[in-house]
Image (tube, grey):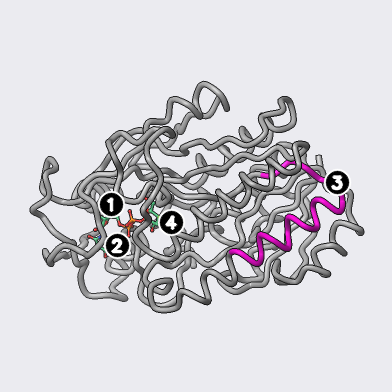
Amino acid sequence: MNVLVTGGLGFIGSHTCVELLNEGHEVIVVDNLYNSKIEVKNYIENITKKQVKVYIQDVCDKEGMKQIFKENKIDSVIHFAGYKAVGESVAKPLMYYENNLISTFSLCEAMLEAECYNLVFSSSATVYGTPERTPIDENCRLGPTTNPYGTTKLFIEQILTDLQFANSKLNIALLRYFNPVGAHESGLLGEDPKGIPNNLMPYIVKVASKELEKLHVFGNDYDTHDGTGVRDYIHVVDLAKGHLCALNKLNTEKIGIDCYNVGTGVGYSVLDMVRAFEKENNLEVPFVIDPRRPGDVATCYSNPDKSCKELGFKAMKTIEDMVRDSWKFVENS
Ligand code: UFG
């Protein structure tokens, strides 16, 4: 199958390209390198020993997207491209709404023109806002979201729902990711955020490598087993495989549009992650306890039953795999 991957040189996109190529699919990437590097193409090819076709182009460029569909017979699309920094989205909401929505419009128009109907969309557990209950299942209330980034994901889910209603041939899986961490076991692909990281794991590795002095743990007075926030961390290679399960579903069944949590169903606290990282890598991660971060919830983890039953997806990697591979990528860079 020929799969177009938007944002295919980014963190989750690149790992998904590897899994697609390993399964024998042809991969066409469109990426504007906003948050990625062209070298990632070589790393994907080194790992898989296969070629990937890359267009350095903005997905917002509608004519450019239509051209890609003219030049390639595309069977399915996985749409990762988008801005994703929560803090930046609060400071620059227009930039987030413009980029994340317009790129989706442009992609969908090109898909419809080319009569390509299978789409996997990279959504996020952030659409649940402050969760109604934990573990979070797909029937939990959506929103209100807590930042513009999250709102773009919620809006796109709604837009795709309306579009599918109007074009019943569309077959769309919305994947709601929990907290992706880890890296490819080769140490070649991983997460390399610009500037000071917002997310826990990129921050931990920068403290371990002494680029940053200490980790700031945001609150130790939550109602959790050690007082620090609990999240559903999922290894990026497991998450990438979840996209293949979703594609497989779309290619064997007409689902219309449906949503699936992609998590492990297990919650770990900030201190669980720090301790696992220290133990597995034999390194120290100095930390201080700071006040709670505004907008954070105590506990957020998935009920993964629907993706297990309907997509046949199950996360296999352990917390040790996550912290070891996250470090290996940094050591290797
Ligand atoms: N944390 C710290 N110190 C840090 C960074 C994070 O203590 O320097 C804590 C947070 O308070 C939280 C946990 O680590 O308890 C995880 O925080 P992250 O920022 O890594 O992740 P979030 O759960 O806040 O958000 C992530 C993604 C969002 C996505 C959301 C989905 O960043 O894009 O999961 O639920 F929307």
- Circle number at residue 204: 2
User: Between disc 3 and disc 2, whose residue precedes?
Assistant: 3
Tell me which residue sits at (54%, 58%) in the image.
11
Q: How far apart in space, not on screen, are marks 3 and 2 (Cα)?
A: 45 Å
Q: Please tell me in which quadrant of the rendered image residue 255 appears.
A: top right
- Circle number at residue 39: none
User: Between disc 3 and disc 4, whose residue precedes?
Assistant: 3
- Which residue is at the front of the view, 192 or 244? 244
Q: Which residue is mark 1?
A: 277
Q: How far apart in space, not on screen, are marks 3 and 4 (Cα)?
A: 42 Å
Q: How far apart in space, not on screen, are marks 2 and 4 (Cα)?
A: 13 Å
Q: Which residues are magenta?
A: 101-119
Circles 3 and 4: CB atoms closer than 8 Å: no
Split into quadrants, the picture shows ligand 1 in the one at bottom left
Residue 326 drawn at (x, y percent): 41, 55
From the viewer's perspective, is the residue at label 3 or at label 4 nearer?
Answer: 3
Tell me which residue sits at (37%, 40%) in the image.
141
Taking the image as shown, residue 260 lies to the left or right of residue 76, namely: left
Q: Which residue is mark 3?
A: 115
Residue 159 drawn at (x, y percent): 61, 52
- For label 4, being within 8 Å of ligand 1 is answered no
- Circle number at residue 328: 4
